[in-house]
Amino acid sequence: MLENVRIAEATPADLPQVLAVERAAFGGDDEAELVERLLDDPSAQPSLSLLAWVEDEAVGHILFTAASIDGPPRPVSVAILAPLAVVPDAQRQGVGGRLIEHGLSIMASRGVELLFLAGHPEYYPRHGFVPASPLGFAPPFPMPPEHEDAWMVRALRDDAIGSVQGRVVCADALNDPDCWRE
Ligand SMILES: CC(C)(COP(=O)(O)OP(=O)(O)OC[C@H]1O[C@@H](n2cnc3c(N)ncnc32)[C@H](O)[C@@H]1OP(=O)(O)O)[C@@H](O)C(=O)NCCC(=O)NCCS
């Protein structure tokens, strides 16, 4: 485990660090460009952007953006977690887990009831995420059948699952089938 990890909300002045973490973690520009578009996207607000720091070096980043459910029987506050990035040198030392837990507690305090993501099915269940399709939540775009388990949900309010169902509608910047291929 990495010691002395500090997690803080990213400010606009931190954008270069946010983008550098995304590029290093994913080894390309796609996720960095997606983050930039999401931070600029009114339909993605309110968002939550957190950086993990070790001293003055940013080693991890997580972004939560606003979403909605198509036609629920009652109003429900939902968000999408994407992307999560930890720089290669800091991976597998608890940084990603701490960013998730810190983010979940802020989102719960803001009244968000359901959090969705498309990600590694072996990683997120340890943070309480479960496959979302069997619970009646369709992703913004159909996922390939072999990746269906990657579409996951975590309830931040006890009775949130079971009381609503429907297709999740994401922010405009995520509303692209290429973002949902795996
Ligand atoms: C996936 C990622 C965010 C995990 O963050 P992290 O800080 O490395 O992970 P943590 O230290 O919190 O958790 C480590 C555990 O997760 C597991 N894990 C890490 N990356 C994993 C992956 N890609 N798939 C499955 N399990 C993974 C490890 O096996 C480890 O388990 P162990 O403790 O039993 O050995 C990070 O590795 C990363 O940024 N990867 C590249 C970008 C990426 O794939 N982002 C996620 C998109 S969904």
Image (cartoon, rainbow, N blue to C red):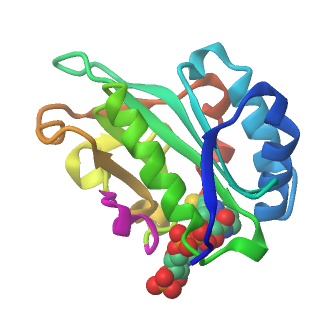
Give the quadrant of residue 9: top right
As for residue 98 lying within the magenta part, the answer is no
Magenta stretch containing residue 124, yes or no?
A: yes
* Magenta segment boundaries in residue numbering: 122-130
Count of residue discs: 0
In the image, what residue occupies the spot 60% across and 49% down? 7
Task: Examine the rendered structure and indicate whether residue 102 appears above or below residue 106.
Answer: below
Instruction: Name the residue: 38% across, 54% down.
Output: 152
* Residue 111, x across and y down, in percent: 31, 25
Q: Image height check: is 175 above or below 125? A: above
Image quadrant in which the C terminus is located: bottom right
Looking at the rendering, which quadrant does residue 107 occupy? Answer: top left
Closer-to-camera residue (138/79): 79
Residue 19: give x, y in percent of width and height: 83, 45
Where is the N terminus found, in terms of image quarters? Answer: bottom right
Residue 154 placement (x, y as % from top left): 31, 49
In the rendered view, does 144 fall on the left or right side of 126? right
Left or right of 78 on screen, residue 64: right
- Ligand 1, image quadrant it occupies: bottom right
* Residue beneath the point at 31% across and 51% down: 132
Position of 109 relative to 136 (above/below): above
Q: Where is residue 108 in the image (x, y as percent from the top left)?
A: 33, 35
- Front position in the image: 77 or 137: 77
Q: Which of 180 and 58 is in front in this view?
A: 58
